[in-house]
Image (cartoon, rainbow, N blue to C red):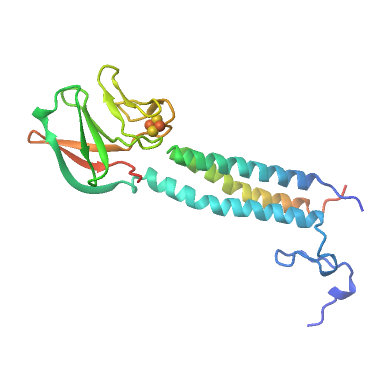
Amino acid sequence: MPSDKNNKIPFNEDNYTHNIERNNERKLDRRGFMKTLAGAAGVFAVSSLPWGAVAAKELMGLGEKEYPHKKITDVSKLAVGDSLEFKFPGDHDDAIIIRLNENKYVAYQNACTHLRCPVFWVKEQNQMVCPCHHGFFDAETGAPTAGPPRRPLPEIQVKVENGAIYAVRVKRYEA
Amino acid sequence: MKRSYVGVAVLAFILFLNIIFTQYMVHQFFYENYVNTLIFCGLNIVLFPIALFAYKKMKNVKA
Ligand code: FES
């Protein structure tokens, strides 16, 4: 197809694929630069998608994995205000359960979210303490209250059945 | 031929916002504030059409 493009110099060549003019290939002109910036915005948009997708998945609770229920201890062996360490879900995943009052149990994976030191329950202070760098966690929620840790401890759901306490699942478990 | 550099400035500003939003998004993700992650992800995505629009508008503007 004969084109009259060649008769008009410079012809209006505006597309997204042929960004470089042969005679001027070393020159980045204003328009080419703007095109690059718009393309960069596109790259940012596309690369945001996986983060958004994983965040949405976490929000919808799909990240919660079910593990086989595991007996922690008997209710009678854990006094109010006491804590007990156990392993859940694997044999090397340290966890801690605290009996806050008669019917309220909370359990967390007790590897500190700072550098994974074991976190202890300190009854007198009513909070969980990481001895390594003085990190503190709220026992009710697992949220960090002071010190280096910035992320909450992964919570373990527990259930009480026939006088025994079972670990059911880990919320938002991260290895 | 004189050119207008407003478009370049606008697009550079959009790139600047992109960088900030991405930074926030990643940090909020690791702090497990997933709602904030989603917000910044959305902002990052809407910036792209805005950038395209700005480019289309400004590419032929002369001062
Ligand atoms: S490892 Fe717990 S505060 Fe550093």
In the picture as drawn, the residue positioned furthest to the front comes out as A132
Q: Is residue A12 visible?
A: yes
Total marks shown come to: 0
Does residue B9 appear to the left or right of A157 in the view shown? right
Residue B8: percent from the left, percent from the top? 77, 47
Does residue A128 appear to the left or right of A82 in the view shown? right
Residue drawn 75% across the image and 51% down it: B57
- The quarter of the picture where residue A80 lies is top left
In the picture as drawn, the residue positioned furthest to the top comes out as A124
User: Which residue is at the front of the view, A175 or A105?
Assistant: A175
User: Which residue is at the front of the view, B20 or A81?
Assistant: A81
In the image, is residue A21 above or below residue A112? below
Residue drawn 77% across the image and 47% down it: B7
Screen quadrant of the N terminus of chain A: bottom right
In the image, is residue A120 above or below residue A29? above
Does residue A38 appear to the left or right of B21 in the view shown? right
Residue B55: percent from the left, percent from the top? 73, 52
Does residue A166 appear to the left or right of B47 in the view shown? left
User: Which residue is at the front of the view, B1 or A40?
Assistant: A40
Q: Quadrant of ligand 1?
A: top left
Residue A166: percent from the left, percent from the top? 16, 39
Residue drawn 34% across the image and 42% down it: A172
Q: Is residue B39 visible?
A: no
Residue drawn 82% across the image and 60% down it: A27
Residue B9: percent from the left, percent from the top? 76, 44
In the picture as drawn, the residue positioned furthest to the right comes out as B1
